[in-house]
Image (tube, rainbow, N blue to C red):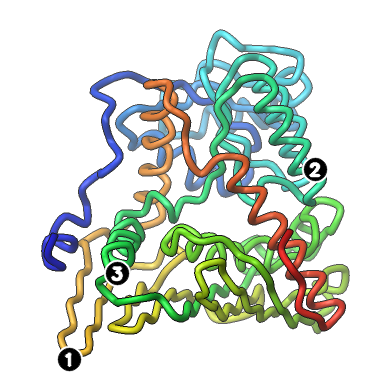
Amino acid sequence: MAVDDYLRSVRRRDWEELEDGTLRIAMVGLGWWTREQAIPAVDDSKFCETTVAVSSSREKAESVADEAETDTITAAVTYDEFVDGAATDEYDAAYVCTPNAYHLPYAEAAADHGKAVLCEKPVEATVDRAEELVAAVEGAGAPLMVAYRMQTDPQVRRMRELVRDGAIGDPVAVHGHMGQQMLDVVSGDPDQWRLDPKLAGYGATVMDLGIYPLNTARFVLDADPTSVTAQMHSEDEAFRKVPDQHAAFTIEFDDGTYAACTASQHAHLSGHFRIVGTEGELILEPSFLGQTPQTLRLRQPDGREVEIDDGRRDLMGDEMTEEFDYFADRVLREVAPSPDGEHALVDMRALGAIYEAAETGETVAVE
């Protein structure tokens, strides 16, 4: 396929095979992301609908159900009721979007009830808990997908195809960055869960933001990390319990490519992703944060530059809708979804290694 053909087909759903059907979803965890991104994305989707709201109290679940711009929610239950099997006739799959350290009990409960699981990333707070979650869901025989929304973003998927087919020669280096003012995003709350290691895991920034360039590089390169280095620090009082208000880390992949990544929870809202090859480079900017217009550029040695803004103006909503519809396509056709639990465990081990490397000052193998 010619380069122009890749870019002209950027909005094509290269994964869609489902002709019809509806996957009913229980939203487990009703924080701002679920309310403002996930529920509206499902409402816009082709193959999904939200039917159950699950929260810490029935009052909150009912309030979110009443306020949602959808009339499909038929049950509002507490976490305990969800675990005990309430409303199991009302949903086919659970979207788990609680703080990281609470993913395990609700993913396990959904799987035990025979439901598919779409779990937010990172899959859990620590490697050990992530391994327990994956084993529990797989042991129950339930489908498990981890919500790396960049993997269903059409422009990222075209980047993967271009790299695979040699459009930039052999990949040499990846540059990735993601930054935001986290306290602005969460209304200035210094006690919110991403700043609590018991809930977030190893840290606040690489776990939450740095995972985006890490996983997107893995997907586009079709490669896995073998070793990492890292530096990080926290300087503001709100970040006193976590080591990584700001972070920089490098990754060596098993294909010989190197990545240099930065992430910050106290920086200008920005993100970019670049892959440099022996015969060109691909740049996706802005990326990761739902900013538009997101533009994909291909630069080649002859001076040619091909650029595409695919016209999306609700990028975050579009990425989430693509993710939910992909999940439904796989679950309803009884095809194993990807990225699966084993894929997510590689990220968890890489994250653990990054925090260890920052603490020790050593290069750490990803095992």
Q: Position of residue 237 (x, y in %)?
A: 84, 77
**Gap in Å between the C-alphas at discs 3 and 2?**
38 Å
Q: Position of residue 38 (x, y in %)?
A: 49, 42
Image quarter of residue 45: top left
CA neighbours of label 3 inside 10 A, class few (<14), some (14 to 19), many (20+): some
Q: Which residue is mark 3?
A: 293
Q: Is residue 64 left or right of residue 336?
A: right
Q: Is residue 101 left or right of residue 333?
A: right
User: Closer to the observer: label 3 or label 1?
Assistant: 1
Q: Amino acid at mark 2?
A: Arg
Q: Quadrant of the C terminus?
A: bottom right
x 18%, y 83%: residue: 305
Asked whether 5 or 57 is in front, the reply is 5
Q: Is residue 238 left or right of residue 30?
A: right
**Gap in Å between the C-alphas at discs 1 and 2?**
49 Å
Mark found first going from the N terminus, 1 or 2: 2
Instruction: Identify the secondary structure beneath mark 3.
Output: loop
x 79%, y 56%: residue: 201
Image quarter of residue 6: bottom left
User: Closer to the observer: label 3 or label 2?
Assistant: 2
**Gap in Å between the C-alphas at discs 3 and 1?**
24 Å
Q: Which residue is mark 1?
A: 303
CA neighbours of label 2 inside 10 A, class few (<14), some (14 to 19), many (20+): some
Asked whether 68 or 47 is in front, the reply is 47
Label for residue 129? 2
